[in-house]
Amino acid sequence: MKVIRVKDQIEGGVAAFELLQEELKTGARVLGLATGSTPIAFYEQVVASDLDFSDLVSVNLDEYVGLGSESDQSYIYFMNEHLFAKKPFKVSYLPNGLAEDLDAEVERYNALLAENPVDFQILGIGRNGHIGFNEPGSPFDGLTRVVDLTPSTIEANSRFFEKEEDVPTQAISMGIASIMSAKTVVLMAYGANKAEAVYQMVQGPVTEDVPASVLQNHPNVYVIVDEEAAGRLENE
């Protein structure tokens, strides 16, 4: 696990983009993507570049149950706004939050991931150490599944909705084993409210109580953090 300290989110986006460029040179063809405010600066770098993604495949970590592309809070809407409409891929896969049969949708997505192994996975981290929507207690061997969101995650996401009652309580999320199968993982974290989670991920014990701590077992992980998010780290 290599920790990269940056001044701010903009510099972090540049650092992540440089890592992507190196991976593309060595043949990366499937990108694992994330949503939320953390990767926006990275996506801005991608959009501003002259990279051609028309032969690449993307797969997203998750989607809210009950939301589709017509909802401006869905993750498909987010990805279209920040990346896909400006830098289209050959094909982009996301879980279908409006699927009538969620079990069948989970099977479909696990099959897609098996057919499209991720070369370069972007991640953020929740204040409780979750990655994707894998909350504390999630099994390390888990694949894509429907998850119940914790109250803390619902509260954190409520800033994007008119009121907390509008926040979905479930999501379809890639599991931890799915995430760990990526060849390269780049996790970004910014701000003092992520400092404890970053510390537990990098220097705490590997435990399902802190899902991101499993990344200590991955052979090729980059952690991009600003000084506030790195505030609790001892010298690496």
Image: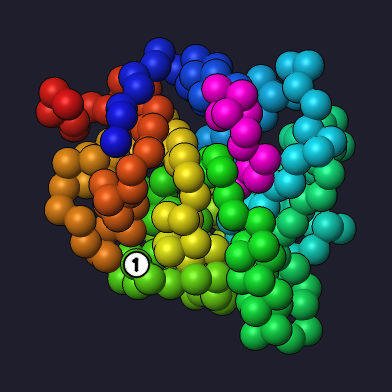
Secondary structure beneath dot 1 equals loop
Residue at image location 54% in from the left, 53% down from the top: 157
Residue drawn where x is 77% and y is 50% of the image: 92
Quarter of the picture holding the N terminus = top left
Report which quarter residue 17 is drawn in: top right
Image location (x, y in percent) of residue 198: 29, 40
26 above or below 114?
Answer: above
The residue at 18%/32% (across/down) is 232
x, y percentage for residue 136? 33, 65
Magenta-highlighted residues: 22-34
Instruction: Name which residue lies at 37% across and 27% down.
Output: 225
Q: Residues within 10 Å of mark 1 (few under 14, many from 20)?
A: some
Q: Nearer the viewer, residue 107 or 191?
A: 107
Q: Is residue 90 left or right of residue 65?
A: right
Residue type for callout 1:
Phe
Is residue 217 shown to the viewer in this render? yes
* Front in this rendered view, residue 206 or 91: 91
Name the colour scheme.
rainbow
Q: In the rendered view, tell whether residue 40 sits above or below residue 12.
A: below
Residue receiving disc 1? 140
Q: Is the residue 170 above or below the residue 218 in the image?
A: below
